[in-house]
Image (cartoon, rainbow, N blue to C red):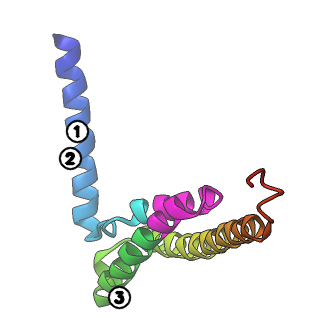
Amino acid sequence: MEENNMSNQGTQQGQNINQQFSNQMGQIALPNSAGILTLGIISIALCWCYGFIALTCGIIALVLGNKAMAVYKANPSNYTLSSYNNAKAGRICAIIGLCLSALMLIYIIVVFAFIGAAFTALPWEMMGRH
């Protein structure tokens, strides 16, 4: 019982210190900056998975990144520079991931088009039908 009270007091003290520090500095983290960076990295990492998952993550990261940039540019003194850099890096990763996944999606479409064209060009006798 005493251990739980001590651990709760420790976490409360840590939260109080963080709140005091952010109140003293007057700056908070940019909304969704870590999520933007995470989605941007995921869009690069998963661009080889037929392009659909990476396109989705990249588009979401790009939209959130643009909103975060607008919020930061409206009042930069309210937000930390590190969160701005995270959002900026996430946007860049999202753009790279979107380009790579778009190329992968185009590649898959071209491959399926060639496979479809190859099967339609074969004579019926070669396919085993008479």
| Residue designated by label 3 | 73
Of callouts 2 and 3, the N-terminal one:
2
Q: Residue furthest right?
A: 126
| First-in-chain label (3 vs 1) | 1
> Residue 23, relative to residue 128: is it above or below?
below
**The magenta segment:** 38-58
Name the residue that disc number 1 marks.
13
Mark 1: which amino acid? Answer: Gln
Identified at 19% across, 29% down, the residue is: 9
Residue type beneath disc 2: Asn
Quarter of the picture containing the C terminus is bottom right
Question: Residue 45 lies in magenta, yes or no?
Answer: yes
Cα separation between marks 3 and 1: 33 Å
Q: Percent position (x, y) of residue 128?
A: 78, 50
Image depth: mark 2 or mark 3 in front: 3
Identify the mark at residue 16; answer none if there is no mark.
2
Compared with 57, 71 (above or below) is below
Which disc number belongs to residue 54?
A: none
Q: Is residue 36 left or right of residue 120?
A: left
Q: Between label 3 and label 1, give the one nearer the viewer.
A: 3
